[in-house]
Amino acid sequence: MVTTNGTNGTNGTNGTNGVNGTNGASAAERPSRNPYASDGDNFLSNVGRFKIIESTLREGEQFANSFFDTETKIKIAQALDDFGVDYIELTSPAASEQSRLDCEKICALGLKAKILTHVRCHMDDARMACAIPGLSGLDIVIGTSSQLREHSHGKDMDHIQRTAVEVINYVKSQGLEVRFSSEDSFRSNLVDLLTIYRAVDQIGVNRVGIADTVGCASPRQVYDLVRTLRGVVSCDIECHFHDDTGCATANAFCALEAGATHIDTSVLGIGERNGITPLGGLMARMIVGNRDYVKDKYRLEKLKDIENLVASAVEINVPFNNPITGFCAFTHKAGIHAKAILNNPSTYEILNPSDFGLSRYVHFASRLTGWNAIKSRCEQLGLHMSDTEYKQCTAKVKALADIRKLTLDDTDAIIRNFHKNVTAGADVPLVEGLTQGEKRLLDEEEAVLDQAANKKGKLDSVAAGLPVDAANSV
Ligand code: HCA
Ligand code: CU
């Protein structure tokens, strides 16, 4: 597997096949007004001032493949801190002795990000967490849906509220931040939810949390619930979205539009089942709405390294279609796209790869290529020809690409040999190693192309009022 500058080669696919790097667009190439900054006049929206609670080291530990030893946890925490996340959430110290020791170690690193730990709404867990030096706060959670009340902890809402108040008061008395969240919020009774949130808000909780534990919520449901909650509590609102039905990033965005202040993420979205809102996906979504905020706050050029770090720690590949860092996220293939991209990247890109320290690629090793892409590749190779010759060279590439899958090397060879033939009168085969069958197919294809070119020449002569025999010399 080969990686070229700016592509993501971690998934072992042909990230280098027929692509040529170009730099990100300059400011002048991009439209000055952002038509996607939709909510400038929405007083509720926090799209331009959200905070991230990064939960790779908590929710991410619940991912099927995760096993983070202490050293890996420290590396991930440092990388997230460098990236600029506001909070790092850690597995409860009550989960295991090693989890408690790791919490202590990470709290002792002196990171800029605030360190939280995620605990059940229980005094024993809260006491254990509050004893960790350097911890900034606790994210407290308890299931409030009828499913969880019946089949998990078996407690009624009065009991939940009494315990919540006791735990929150205790954590506050220890001088730490505290968030109270209801697990499975979207399948909880709305009156129950609002009642308990109002109660904890009144005793001074820092944040209340909404969790779509089973990933069932749609963006519109999220907007409605957060909007309603915003009218009931004055504290911050944190949201946590699972991705079972593919809405985790959209739900995070809608939550912010409706007045949520904090979003939970994990790197690559890893978590229970298929995980939660991915850090990179959220960055992609948010930079479109408010580029300055996102660029100023987060070191976006670090994203790819963090994803690779976590991917290798949990032994997965970065998905090919990952926002921003998927190997083809900034690769343009069709001739029409390539032409427009070469003129002005904003034609087919809503994200600017240079914002993430990446490059875009124009794929030219395929039957869909066009002469602008081939010309651009020739120029990169320092091979100059006339426009007619670039077009003829493109026809050769397309003819061969019709016969078999071309690699970048094949295509460069065709270009180089074609250039040699036309400029130095050489007669070298365009590509080596064709089988007899491929040669025959190529001859047939070229015969068809010659016929078509001949016909076109004749038609052009007729249109220009020349004798038809002049066609070949036009
Ligand atoms: C879980 C808990 C949780 C908690 C979310 C939160 C969820 O089920 O593992 O604290 O807001 O998804 O409900 O991750
Ligand atoms: Cu979760």
Image (spheres, grey):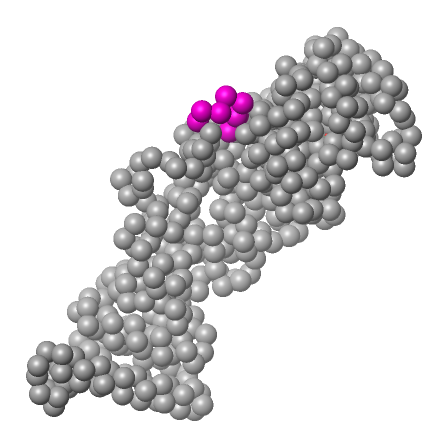
Which residue is situated farthest in the left direction here? 466
Q: Which is nearer the eye, 37 or 129?
A: 37
Q: Residue 455: percent from the left, percent from the top?
A: 23, 85
Magenta stretch in the rendered image: 40-47
Q: Which is nearer the eye, 331 or 258?
A: 258
Seen at 32% across and 67% down, the residue is 370
Report the side of 129 relative to 287 (left or right): right
Q: Residue 131: percent from the left, percent from the top?
A: 77, 17
Q: Residue 176: percent from the left, percent from the top?
A: 69, 14
Residue 146: image quadrant is top right
Considering the whole magenta stretch, tell me its main secondary structure: loop
Compared to 354, does 395 lie above or below?
Answer: below
Residue 210: image quadrant is top right
Which residue is situated farthest in the top direction here? 173
Q: Residue 271: percent from the left, percent from the top?
A: 70, 42
Residue 74 seen in the figure: no
Seen at 66% across and 44% down, the residue is 243
Which corner quadrant holds the C terminus? bottom left
Q: Is residue 140 magenta?
A: no
Seen at 24% across and 70% down, the residue is 390
Seen at 88% across and 20% down, the residue is 159
Compared to 192, does 151 lie above or below?
Answer: below
Residue 195 seen in the figure: yes
Report the side of 231 relative to 378 (left or right): right
Report the side of 225 relative to 367 (left or right): right
Q: Is residue 41 magenta?
A: yes
Report the side of 381 relative to 289 (left or right): left
**Across the whole image, how many numbered discs are drawn on residues?**
0
